[in-house]
Image (cartoon, grey):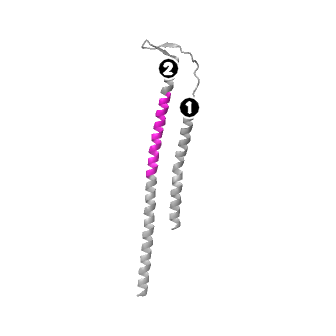
């Protein structure tokens, strides 16, 4: 009920908001990255021109371009997955710190209650000694 505990509670709310902001910005980043990955660039040639491959078979430029696009998408997906894992680790780290802060708040509140109890006991002792 003291202003100090109100401050701690306000700080806790601010801390939760502060730690949720990176998640908001990460979601914006992934939304933009997804939109960018959906944009396709037109190929310069749509005709299938055979190109000899080292194995002696024929492969079209179109097939090579398609494979290159698939490889790029796979790399982009792998990068995004790594970023997601990093974000998940950061979130877990933040959650652990938040839990520690909440435990500290509870401990401080308990200490405040103990101080109040000690003050009451001291006041009672002083009253008792004052009567004698």
Q: Is residue 79 left or right of residue 35?
A: left
Q: Residue at x 42, y 73 (%)?
A: 118
Region rendered in magenta: 72-96
Q: Is residue 43 left or right of residue 54?
A: right
Quadrant where the C terminus is found in the figure: bottom left
Give the vertical position of 87 relative to 64 (above or below).
below
Give the vertical position of 35 relative to 3 (above or below).
above
Q: Residue at x 50, y 57 (%)?
A: 12
Position of residue 44 measured from the top left corner of the image (x, y, whole percent): 59, 19
Per the image, label 2 sits on a secondary structure element best described as helix
Q: Residues within 10 Å of mark 2 (few under 14, many from 20)?
A: few
Q: Main secondary structure of the magenta part?
A: helix
Instruction: Spot the residue most to the front.
Output: 47
Measured Cα–Cα span from mark 2 to mark 1? 20 Å
What number is the disc on residue 38? 1
Closer-to-camera residue (1/7): 1
Q: Quadrant of residue 24?
A: top right
Per the image, label 1 sits on a secondary structure element best described as helix
Closer-to-camera residue (67/121): 67
Q: Residues within 10 Å of mark 1 (few under 14, many from 20)?
A: few
Which badge, 2 or 1, is on the more N-terminal residue?
Answer: 1
Q: In this figure, which residue is indicated by the disc labeled 2?
A: 64
């Amino acid at each position: 009920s003291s202003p100090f505990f109100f401050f701690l509670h306000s700080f806790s709310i601010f801390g939760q908001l502060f730690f949720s902001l990176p998640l908001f910005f990460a979601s914006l980043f992934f939304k933009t990255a997804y939109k960018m990955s959906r944009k396709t660039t037109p190929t310069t040639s749509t005709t299938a021109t055979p190109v000899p491959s080292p194995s002696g078979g024929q492969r079209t430029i179109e097939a090579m371009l398609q494979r290159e696009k698939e490889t790029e998408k796979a790399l982009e997906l792998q990068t995004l997955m790594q970023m997601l894992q990093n974000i998940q680790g950061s979130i877990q780290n933040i959650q652990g710190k938040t839990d520690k802060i909440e435990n500290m708040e509870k401990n401080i509140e308990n200490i405040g209650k103990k101080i109040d109890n000690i003050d009451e006991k001291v006041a009672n002792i002083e009253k008792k000694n004052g009567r004698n």
